[in-house]
């Protein structure tokens, strides 16, 4: 076999492998499908880490957010309050360093709470 034939065969094999592995049009990588967040998998961990210190039975907040039933009732208000950054409250100035007890939410956590509402 000549080098041209070997190169052509290798090219055909490479294209066939690429076609099998890449199921998207025009060779773009396929991103994982976006799923609707669930309470127990996505929302509850955020509430536990950032909200339930105050939002619990006998806590200083006006309503507990410990169960699905409790939180679901307030889902749209949770989304609104976190998107406007009214909740969780944090008054320390970030220009003076990072604080270990900062309850602030990341943009991803805010988006999760908003899409769950």
Image (cartoon, rainbow, N blue to C red):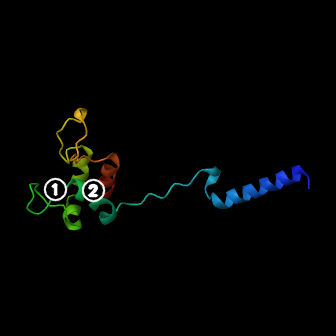
Residue 54 percent location from the top left of the image: 14, 55
Assign a secondary structure to mark 2.
helix
Residue 85 percent location from the top left of the image: 23, 43
Q: Residue at x 82, y 56 (%)?
A: 9
Q: Quadrant of the N terminus?
A: bottom right
Residue contact between numbered discs 1 and 2, judged by CB atoms under 8 Å: no
Q: What count of labels does the image hold?
A: 2
Q: Quadrant of residue 30?
A: bottom right
60 and 81: which one is in front?
A: 60
Q: Quadrant of residue 66?
A: bottom left
Query: Residue 21, can we see it?
Result: yes
Q: Which of disc 2 and disc 1 is earlier in sequence? A: 2
Query: Residue 75, can we see it?
Result: no
Q: Furthest residue to the top?
A: 95
Label 1, label 2: how many angstroms apart (C-alpha)? 12 Å
Left or right of 49 in this view: 38: right
Residue 65 percent location from the top left of the image: 18, 61
Q: Residue at x 21, y 61 (%)?
A: 71
Q: Residue at x 38, y 60 (%)?
A: 36
Residue receiving disc 2: 46
Binning the other alpha carbons within 10 Å of mark 1 as few (below 14), some (14 to 19) or many (20 upward) gives some
Left or right of 47 in this view: 18: right
45 and 29: which one is in front?
A: 45
Q: Quadrant of the C terminus?
A: bottom left
Assign a secondary structure to mark 1.
loop
Residue 25 percent location from the top left of the image: 63, 53
Depicted 84 relative to depicted 58: above or below: above
Q: Furthest residue to the right?
A: 1
Depicted 91 relative to depicted 11: above or below: above
Residue receiving disc 1: 53
């Amino acid at each position: 076999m000549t080098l041209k034939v070997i190169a052509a065969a290798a090219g055909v094999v490479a294209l066939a492998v690429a076609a099998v592995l890449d199921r998207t049009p025009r060779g773009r990588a396929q991103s994982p499908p976006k799923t609707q967040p669930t309470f127990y998998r996505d929302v509850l961990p955020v509430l536990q880490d950032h909200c339930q210190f105050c939002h619990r039975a006998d806590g200083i907040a006006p309503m507990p957010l410990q169960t699905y039933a409790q939180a679901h009732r307030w889902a749209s208000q949770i989304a609104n309050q976190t998107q406007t950054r009214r909740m969780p409250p944090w008054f320390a100035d970030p220009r003076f360093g990072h604080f270990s007890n900062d309850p602030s939410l990341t943009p991803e956590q805010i988006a999760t709470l908003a899409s769950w509402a």
